[in-house]
């Protein structure tokens, strides 16, 4: 005798009627009722074939509500989530490629292509010199304070 045990307790669902959960059973009964109503209401007006197709379309929402699950959510929660993301809080996601290399090297590329004026080139060179001097001053003051001094004994690993 084999006893079937679910690996995950969250996946366990008690089967109540004909091997269906209570939710599946209720929506199956509602779907059958809608199908019967549509069939008898439309059989004489539209014909047998069209009436049966309308019945199938009428039962589809009840089948979805009763049986479908997506990412652990029942169909109505999936529909509400879709409604929120699509209509209530829509966001446009634009994929704009960016090049980190180009952003860093934009000035150098512009200088090589000659698209900068002489005044702009001088301003860039002055700024670069100021930055280099500032970095050198910081390095010198750290060395004077003993901040980044290299100990010869700890250099060999």
Image (tube, rainbow, N blue to C red):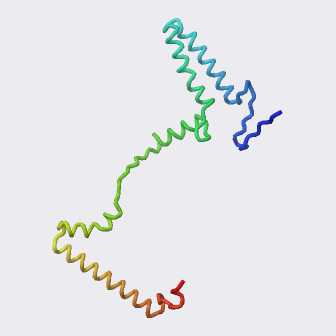
**Residue 21's spot in the image, x, y percent?**
71, 30
**Residue 88's spot in the image, x, y percent?**
47, 42
State the residue at coordinates (17%, 74%).
Answer: 119
In this image, 17 relative to 146: left or right? right
Q: Nearer the viewer, residue 5 or 55?
A: 5
Q: Residue furthest front?
A: 156
State the residue at coordinates (73%, 24%).
Answer: 18
Q: Nearer the viewer, residue 75 or 154?
A: 154
Which image quarter holds the N terminus?
top right
State the residue at coordinates (66%, 21%).
Answer: 29
In this image, 108 relative to 119: left or right? right
**Residue 43's spot in the image, x, y percent?**
54, 8
Count of picture labels: 0
Quarter of the image holding residue 135? bottom left
In this image, 107 relative to 156: left or right? left
Image: 49 above or below 13:
above
Image: 34 above or below 127:
above
State the residue at coordinates (75%, 34%).
Answer: 14
Quarter of the image holding residue 20? top right
Q: Residue furthest top?
A: 44
Q: Residue furthest right?
A: 1
In this image, 65 relative to 15: left or right? left
Q: Residue furthest bottom?
A: 144
Quarter of the image holding residue 87? top left
**Residue 64's spot in the image, x, y percent?**
58, 29
Image: 138 above or below 55:
below
Which image quarter holds the C terminus?
bottom right
Image: 108 above or below 136:
above
């Amino acid at each position: 005798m084999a006893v079937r045990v679910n690996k995950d307790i969250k996946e366990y669902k008690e089967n109540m009627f004909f091997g269906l959960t209570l939710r599946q059973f209720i929506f199956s009964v509602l779907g059958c009722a809608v199908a019967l109503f549509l069939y008898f209401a439309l059989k004489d007006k539209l014909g047998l074939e069209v009436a049966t197709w309308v019945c199938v379309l009428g039962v589809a929402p009840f089948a979805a509500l009763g049986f479908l699950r997506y990412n652990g959510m029942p169909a109505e929660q999936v529909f509400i989530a879709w409604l929120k993301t699509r209509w209530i809080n829509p966001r446009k996601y634009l994929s704009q490629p960016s090049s980190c290399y180009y952003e860093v090297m934009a000035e150098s590329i512009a200088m090589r292509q000659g698209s900068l004026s002489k005044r702009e080139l001088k301003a860039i060179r002055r700024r670069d010199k100021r930055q280099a001097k500032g970095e050198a001053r910081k390095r010198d003051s750290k060395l004077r304070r003993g901040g980044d001094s290299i100990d010869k004994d700890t250099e060999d690993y």
